[in-house]
């Protein structure tokens, strides 16, 4: 069906001091925006590209409660975005390049302007981890993709290798079946790591091949990707898999590079919080995929957003 | 079938209300069978827009029959949209501006209608200095959130300088182009046929790519 998606611009970088700036317009940031708006905090959400974050590029969310037949990732993001606006929370689009979070008043910097706030929720999420293999740089964006919804349509009836076999990998592998049947999964672990229901479903596509306990050594080709060289972890046996495209789902890295150095991160760069989602800096909270946690899902992000906004409300009351 | 919610219509009404000049959208349809459904889709989108603002004027041409207009606007195939004020600005959409690309279409309309170009002034000045022909082709899919930024930058450059023309190319509609140009990731930006880069670059970097291609 024909769908029209619209990014509504609200470029009004303000001179006032906000009660709360939320960095990131994914499910965590949007939910925080809903709760903060209802608490009548003067709140702005800053989003870099498009609200919904990673979930916006998910074809169908089946495990988010309330939608018995599932809901499109982008559709859910748009509903949440409209819901946020009902309560007076602003959304502006821009890229935060640095922050100063240590003082009473927090400064959020864009390339040519800034915003001030009394409290900050960092909900900047995570971005896909890049594949490390020979040829990875050469073919970045030219056969290697991290977004099946973006690029899948370009590989109609082509050969696709999917690296990884977790939830994202299998979900996108099912999505890509609409374009091609020639799909091969390569995963370093000797078993699939996706939810059991996804494992069952991918088995409904008998043409799909799996190489488990196998890593990608190189991505090969002259102008275009022509094959990958894979290597088994145990026997160290190398072999070629013909491929026109390589879709990579090998985990995520948190987006924390623009933040103050004083903010406490764990060894992988995720933000450390207490159970109320407060970071080590006063008035600074973190929600969603960007913080240390076990389960990174839309629902846990939304839950974080609610808790973080509530914590901000209490923090501002007690000041 | 209404594609836009009432709320979206109201939002657009507000956005279009200040426009000070007409925005002419020329639709070039085609009789080629495989594209007739796409032409219908575009007509639905355009009639929605036309009903929202009387500043938006739609004209329909046939790629096969109206050869004078095809020549005049250098249309390569249908379905294609040409967005213009009174004069041609070199702004085109090959295929359907739907999904995320609907945003590009709306923002282009606002820029043209307000006779402004939403671009950093320093960059604008440098774009205006380009004195050689530049054609920018931006390949997109409807489901690519990063693509509209690449389309818009190209279209803004075209609005700024008559030596520059810029085409959105919808990979879903024109799959043969995808193969011809070997597009394997979107957005892909092709400059004067021979140079290309992938990804949505900031305006500054985008301009550098164009200047490099002209060397």
Image (cartoon, coloured by chain):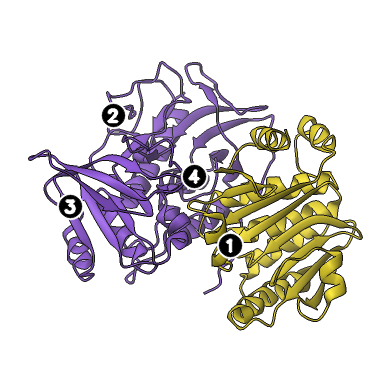
Q: How far apart are marks 3 and 2 (CA)?
A: 40 Å
Expressed as whole percent of the image width and height from the top left, the position of residue B70 reads 81, 70
Marks 3/4: CA–CA distance: 37 Å
Q: Is residue A63 visible?
A: no
Give the colour in which the image draws chain B.
yellow
Q: Which is in the foreground here, disc 2 or disc 1?
A: 1
Q: Name the residue under label 3.
A: A211
Answer left or right for A136 relative to B135.
Answer: left
Q: In this view, does B5 lie above or below A59?
A: below
> Judging from the image, what secondary structure is the residue with disc 3 in?
strand
Give the CA separation, mark 4 to mark 1: 34 Å
Instruction: Identify whether A215 is placed above or below B28.
Output: above
- Residue at mark 4: chain: A
The 10 Å Cα crowd at callout 2, few under 14, some 14 to 19, many 20 or more, is: few
* Residue picked out by circle 4: A25
Mark 2 → mark 4, Cα distance in angstroms: 22 Å
- Is residue B59 placed above or below A75 in the rendered structure? below
Q: Which chain is purple?
A: A
- Looking at this view, name the residue that lies furthest to the left: A235
Residue located 80% across and 81% down the image: B65
Residue A317 relative to residue A173: left or right: right
Q: How crowded is mark 3: few (under 14 residues within 10 Å), some or many (20 or more)?
A: some
Give the mark, 3 or 2, whose residue is nearer the N terminus: 3
Q: Nearer the viewer, mark 3 or mark 2?
A: 3
Identify the residue under disc 2: A274
Q: Which residue is drawn at 58% across and 67% down?
A: B174
In what element is the residue under mark 4?
loop
């Amino acid at each position: 069906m024909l769908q029209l998606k619209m990014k509504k611009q609200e470029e009004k970088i303000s001179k006032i001091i906000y009660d709360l700036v939320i960095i990131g317009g994914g499910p965590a940031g949007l939910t925080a925006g809903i709760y903060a708006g209802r608490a009548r905090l003067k709140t702005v959400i800053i989003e870099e590209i498009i609200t919904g974050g990673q979930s916006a590029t998910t074809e169908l969310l089946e495990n988010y409660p309330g939608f018995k037949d599932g809901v499109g990732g982008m559709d859910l993001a748009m509903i949440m975005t409209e819901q946020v606006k009902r309560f007076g929370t602003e959304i502006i689009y821009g890229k935060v390049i640095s922050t100063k979070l240590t003082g009473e008043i927090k400064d959020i910097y864009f390339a040519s302007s800034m915003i001030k706030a009394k409290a900050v929720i960092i909900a900047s999420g995570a971005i896909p981890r890049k594949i490390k293999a020979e040829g990875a740089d050469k073919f970045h964006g030219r056969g290697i993709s991290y977004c099946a919804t973006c690029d899948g349509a370009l590989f109609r009836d082509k050969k696709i290798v999917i690296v990884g076999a977790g939830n994202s990998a299998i979900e996108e592998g099912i999505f890509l079946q609409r374009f091609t049947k020639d799909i091969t999964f390569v995963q370093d672990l000797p078993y699939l790591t996706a939810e059991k229901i996804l494992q069952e479903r991918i088995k409904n596509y008998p043409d799909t091949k799996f190489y488990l306990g196998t890593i990608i050594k190189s991505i090969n080709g002259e102008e275009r990707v022509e094959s990958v060289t894979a290597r088994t972890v145990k026997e160290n046996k190398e072999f070629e898999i013909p491929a026109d495209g390589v879709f990579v789902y090998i985990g995520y890295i948190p987006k924390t590079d623009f933040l103050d150095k004083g903010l406490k991160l764990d060894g992988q760069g995720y933000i450390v919080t207490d159970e109320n989602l407060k970071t080590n800096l006063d008035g600074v909270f973190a929600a969603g995929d960007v913080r240390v946690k076990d389960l990174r899902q839309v629902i846990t992000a939304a839950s974080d957003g609610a808790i973080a906004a509530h914590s901000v409300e209490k923090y501002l009351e007690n000041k | 079938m209404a594609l836009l919610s009432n709320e979206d219509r109201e939002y657009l009404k507000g956005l279009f209300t200040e426009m000070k000049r007409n925005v002419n959208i020329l639709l070039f349809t085609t009789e080629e069978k495989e594209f007739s459904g796409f032409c219908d889709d575009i007509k639905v989108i355009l009639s929605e827009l036309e009903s929202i603002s009387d500043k938006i004027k739609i004209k329909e041409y046939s790629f096969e029959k109206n050869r004078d207009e095809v020549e005049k606007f250098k249309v390569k195939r249908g379905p294609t949209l040409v967005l213009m004020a009174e004069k041609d600005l070199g702004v085109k959409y090959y295929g359907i501006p739907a999904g995320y690309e609907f945003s590009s279409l709306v923002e282009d309309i606002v820029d043209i209608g307000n006779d402004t170009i939403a671009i950093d002034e320093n960059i604008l000045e440098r774009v205006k200095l380009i004195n050689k022909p530049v054609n920018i082709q931006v390949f997109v899919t409807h489901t690519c959130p990063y693509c509209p930024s690449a389309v818009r930058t190209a279209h803004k450059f075209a609005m700024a300088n008559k030596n520059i023309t810029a085409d959105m190319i919808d990979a879903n509609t024109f799959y043969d182009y995808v193969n011809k140009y070997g597009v394997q990731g979107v957005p892909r930006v092709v400059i004067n046929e021979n140079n290309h880069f992938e990804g949505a670059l900031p305006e500054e970097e985008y301009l550098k790519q164009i200047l490099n291609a002209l060397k």
